[in-house]
C-alpha cells in the first residue's frame, strides 16, 4: 500500500537560516551604538522567550519564574569568574549547568502535578530568589549587584561588533534548537501534552519526563539569555529577576504568538523596539502601548506569527460582522 | 512466545472507589487474532475495566497480562509502546494539531526519545520523519480522509474525528486495538462505514477489544462477547449464545424491556 496523496510538506530549516543571515547583516544597516545595543537586547529577549515558548506555547506548562533563571544564569556567569576565577567559556557552560540543575530540582516534584501548581511554585521561587539577591550582600552584592568582567580576546576587551556577533551566535544556537524541537516529533509530543495529557500518554508519550525535559530546556535558554545580557551590560543585579521582566516575557509571547516557530523573535523585535519609537509621544506612550496590547489580544490571539493563518482573518471578519449587526 | 497463549489475560481483577466496587473479580481473555466485545448496561463497570487495561487507572487487586508480560502496574505510555492502542469514547484528538499531525503522534514511540537522541540521529531522523508522514498518509487514505490531512481536527465532523482517532491508534501498528464505544454519537451511515472498516481490520487478523452499547453493531463485529453487570462478569461466550443467555437477557435486555414498558 503506498500513499496516493503526498503528505503536506515538512517545515524546513531555511526560514531560521534566513533570520540568522539577516541578523549577521544587521550591524551594517544600523546607525550607532544605541541601535546596535537595541538589536542585542532583541536577540537576548528572543532567546529568553523561545525557551518560554517551548514551555508554555508548546507544552502548555506555565512558569512564572523564567526571569529568575535569566538572573541565575547571569549571577552564575559573573560569580564563577569573580569568585572561582573560571575562564569565561567555562563559566558560560557552568552557568547553564547551574540553571539545568536548579530546574531539575524544582521540576521533579512539581511536574507530576497538573494545572496551576507549577505557576504558583515558580512564582514563590522567584520571590525567594529576589529576596536572597537583595539581602545576601556579601555574596551577591545586594541591590547594587556585581560588576562582571568584560570578555577579553588576546588580552584586549572585545569590541562592540564582536560582542554583537557573540550574542548573535547565542541566539543562533537557541533559534536552531527551538526550531529543531518545534518542527519535529518532540514538538508534536509537547503540543499533545498541552492539549490532553491522558491522550498523549495513551499514544506512548512519557508525559512527566517530557514536561521535565522542556522545563529544564526552558531554564537553560533563560540562563543563556542571562549570560548574553551580562556580556552586553557588564552588570548583574536583582532587577533582572524583577516582575517587569516577567511581564515583558508574557507580552512578547502574546504579541509574537504562542506555540509558533518565530513568534518569540517577532514579539521580541516589536516589544523591545516599539517603546523606543513611542518615547516621542511623551505621556501618551503608555496609553498607546496599552491599546496596542488590547488590539493584539482581541484581533490576533495567535500573535504576529498567526497573521498568515486563515483562522485569524476569519476571526477578524466574524468580529466585524458581529458589531455591524449590533449598531 | 507460544501461539496458543492469549494476547490479553485479565485475572480476577477488582477495582474499588472508596466503598463502591466498580469491577469485582473479573477474568477474561482475548486470544490472538480475536475480536472480543465487552458489553453491559450503564454502570456495569465496562469503562472502568477499559481504564484498568489501558492503565489510566490501576487495579486494586488481580493481574493483567499483555503479550506474555505482567502489565498490571505499568503506566499508560509503557503499555502503549508494548502495542496496546486505544480510541476514546469522547473523541480526544489534539485540537492544536492538524489531522496529519494527530495521526503522526500515533507513531511517537518509533521516534528517538528526547532532545539529545534526536539531535544525534541527524539525517536518519529526517528520513524517519518522511517515512512516518508517508505511513500516516496511507492510514488517512485507509479511513478516507487523506484530503483533509492539512485541516484542523475541529473542522471535521464527529464521524470523521472518530476515524482519525482510529487511524492514529493504528499508526503504531498495535497488537491489540481497544475501541471505547466507537459508534457513540455516529449516524447510521457513519456507523455502517465504521463497521465495514473494523471488519476489514478483523479480516487482516488484528486483535480488538470493543466496548459498545449498540447491540447489533457488536453482535456482528465480534468473535466472542463478555457481558458485565454491576461490576461482575455474567457471561462470556460466542455472540449467538450470549444473545440467548438468560442472565444476559435478565440483566441487560430484560431490564431495558422492563424500562420500555413503563
Image (cartoon, rainbow, N blue to C red):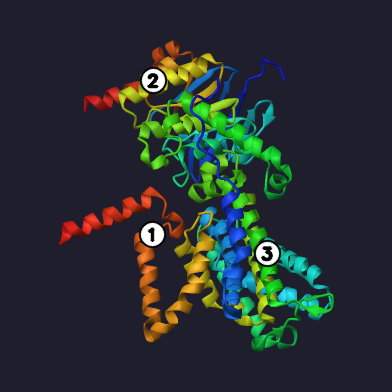
Of A113 and B246, which appears nearest the observer? A113
The residue where tag 2 is placed is B217
Measure the alpha-carbon separation of dots 2 and 3. 59 Å
Q: Kindly identify which residue carries mark 3.
A: A170
Of mark 1 and mark 3, the one earlier in the sequence is 3
Residue at screen point 38% across, 86% down: A283
Left or right of residue B12, residue A74 in this image:
right
Residue lying farthest to the left in this orientation: A327
Q: Chain of mark 3?
A: A
- Say if mark 2 contacts mark 3, CB within 8 Å: no
Residue B69 position by quadrant:
top right
Residue B11 x %, y %: 61, 28
Instruction: Say if labels 2 and 1 share a chain.
Output: no
Quadrant containing the C terminus of chain A in the rendered view? bottom left
Q: Is residue A134 visible?
A: yes
SS assignment at label 1:
loop
Badge 2: chain ID? B
- Closer mark to the observer between disc 2 and disc 3: 3
Q: Position of residue A173 (x, y in %)?
A: 67, 59
Amino acid at each position: 500500500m503506498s500513499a496516493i496523496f503526498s503528505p503536506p510538506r515538512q517545515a524546513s530549516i531555511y526560514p531560521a537560516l534566513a533570520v540568522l543571515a539577516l541578523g549577521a547583516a544587521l550591524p551594517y544597516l544600523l546607525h550607532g551604538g544605541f541601535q546596535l545595543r537595541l538589536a542585542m537586547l532583541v536577540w537576548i529577549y528572543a532567546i529568553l522567550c523561545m525557551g518560554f515558548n517551548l514551555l508554555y506555547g508548546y507544552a502548555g506548562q506555565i512558569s512564572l519564574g523564567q526571569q529568575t533563571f535569566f538572573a541565575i544564569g547571569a549571577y552564575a556567569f559573573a560569580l564563577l569568574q569573580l569568585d572561582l576565577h573560571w575562564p569565561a567559556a567555562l563559566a558560560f557552560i557552568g552557568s547553564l549547568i547551574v540553571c539545568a540543575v536548579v530546574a531539575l530540582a524544582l521540576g521533579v516534584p512539581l511536574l507530576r502535578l497538573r494545572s496551576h501548581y507549577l505557576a504558583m511554585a515558580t512564582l514563590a521561587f522567584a520571590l525567594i530568589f529576589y529576596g536572597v539577591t537583595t539581602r545576601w550582600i556579601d555574596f551577591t552584592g545586594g541591590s547594587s549587584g556585581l560588576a562582571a568582567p568584560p570578555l577579553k580576546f588576546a588580552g584586549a576587551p572585545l569590541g562592540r561588533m564582536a560582542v554583537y556577533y557573540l550574542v548573535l551566535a547565542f541566539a543562533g544556537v537557541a533559534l536552531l534548537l527551538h526550531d529543531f524541537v518545534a518542527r519535529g516529533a518532540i514538538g508534536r509530543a509537547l503540543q499533545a501534552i498541552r492539549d490532553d495529557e491522558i491522550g498523549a500518554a495513551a499514544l506512548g508519550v512519557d508525559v512527566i519526563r517530557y514536561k521535565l525535559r522542556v522545563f529544564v530546556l526552558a531554564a537553560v535558554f533563560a540562563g543563556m539569555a542571562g549570560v548574553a545580557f551580562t556580556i552586553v551590560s557588564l552588570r548583574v543585579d536583582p532587577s533582572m529577576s524583577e516582575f517587569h521582566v516577567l511581564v515583558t516575557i508574557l507580552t512578547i509571547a502574546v504579541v509574537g504568538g504562542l506555540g509558533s516557530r518565530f513568534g518569540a523573535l517577532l514579539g521580541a523585535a516589536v516589544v523591545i523596539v516599539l517603546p523606543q519609537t513611542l518615547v516621542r509621544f511623551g505621556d501618551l506612550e503608555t496609553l498607546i502601548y496599552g491599546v496596542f496590547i488590547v488590539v493584539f489580544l482581541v484581533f490576533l490571539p495567535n500573535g504576529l506569527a498567526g497573521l498568515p493563518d486563515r483562522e485569524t482573518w476569519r476571526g477578524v471578519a466574524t468580529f466585524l460582522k458581529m458589531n455591524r449587526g449590533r449598531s | 512466545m507460544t501461539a496458543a497463549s492469549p494476547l490479553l489475560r485479565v485475572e480476577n481483577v477488582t477495582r474499588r472507589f472508596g466503598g463502591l466496587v466498580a469491577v469485582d473479580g473479573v477474568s477474561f481473555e482475548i486470544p490472538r487474532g480475536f475480536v472480543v466485545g465487552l458489553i453491559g448496561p450503564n454502570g456495569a463497570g465496562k469503562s472502568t475495566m477499559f481504564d484498568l487495561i489501558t492503565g489510566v487507572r490501576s487495579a486494586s487487586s488481580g493481574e493483567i497480562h499483555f503479550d506474555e508480560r505482567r502489565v498490571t502496574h505499568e503506566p499508560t505510555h509503557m503499555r502503549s509502546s508494548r502495542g496496546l492502542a486505544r480510541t476514546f469514547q469522547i473523541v480526544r484528538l489534539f485540537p492544536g494539531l492538524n489531522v496529519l499531525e494527530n495521526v503522526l503522534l500515533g507513531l511517537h514511540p518509533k521516534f528517538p526519545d528526547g532532545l539529545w537522541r534526536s539531535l544525534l540521529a541527524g539525517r536518519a531522523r529526517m528520513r524517519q520523519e518522511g517515512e512516518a508522514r508517508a505511513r500516516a498518509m496511507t492510514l488517512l487514505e485507509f479511513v478516507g480522509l487523506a484530503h483533509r490531512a492539512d485541516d484542523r481536527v475541529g473542522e471535521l465532523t464527529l464521524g470523521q474525528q472518530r476515524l482519525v482517532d482510529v487511524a492514529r491508534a493504528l499508526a503504531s501498528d498495535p497488537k491489540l486495538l481497544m475501541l471505547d464505544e466507537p459508534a457513540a454519537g455516529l449516524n447510521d451511515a457513519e456507523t455502517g462505514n465504521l463497521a465495514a472498516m473494523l471488519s476489514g481490520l478483523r479480516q487482516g487478523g488484528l486483535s480488538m477489544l470493543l466496548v459498545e452499547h449498540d447491540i447489533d453493531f457488536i453482535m456482528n463485529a465480534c468473535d466472542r462477547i463478555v457481558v458485565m453487570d454491576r461490576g461482575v462478569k455474567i457471561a462470556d461466550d460466542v455472540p449467538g449464545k450470549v444473545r440467548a443467555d438468560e442472565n444476559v437477557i435478565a440483566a441487560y435486555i430484560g431490564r431495558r424491556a422492563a424500562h420500555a414498558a413503563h
